[in-house]
Amino acid sequence: MAKFETTNYAQMRRCRMAHLHGQRVDEMFEDGATVTGYIHTVRPDLTCWPLRWTITIEQQPTQSPALLLQD
């Protein structure tokens, strides 16, 4: 898993929508890193201004407990 921080609202929305729909992302972050994978978490840091989000990306998707229960 890799963690990145961003203050870009549009980038955060793209990552959050990919997380909700279980899609892969191919993002370039502010430090110049280009990452491809699945979004694990998108967490806001509400203690600073401008707002900052920590995005965790993993190479393989994890199955949610709800998906594991369905047979």
Image: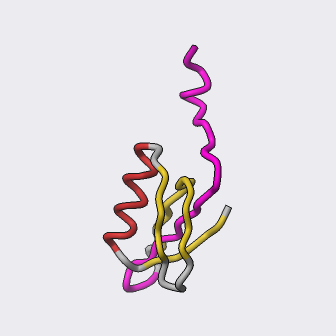
Write the start and end of the magenta stretch as one range: 48-71
Q: Nearer the viewer, residue 65 or 35?
A: 35
Q: Residue furthest top?
A: 71
Q: Residue at x 53, y 84 (%)?
A: 32
Quarter assignment of residue 49 = bottom left
Q: Position of residue 10 (x, y in %)?
A: 31, 70
Q: Position of residue 13 (x, y in %)?
A: 34, 62
Q: Residue at x 48, y 73 (%)?
A: 45
Q: Nearer the viewer, residue 30 or 53?
A: 30
Residue 11 sits above or below residue 60 on the image: below
* Left or right for 61, reference 21: right
Residue 69 sits above or below residue 49 on the image: above
Q: Residue furthest left?
A: 10
* Left or right for 48, reference 41: left
Q: Position of residue 20 (x, y in %)?
A: 42, 46
Is 63 magenta? The answer is yes
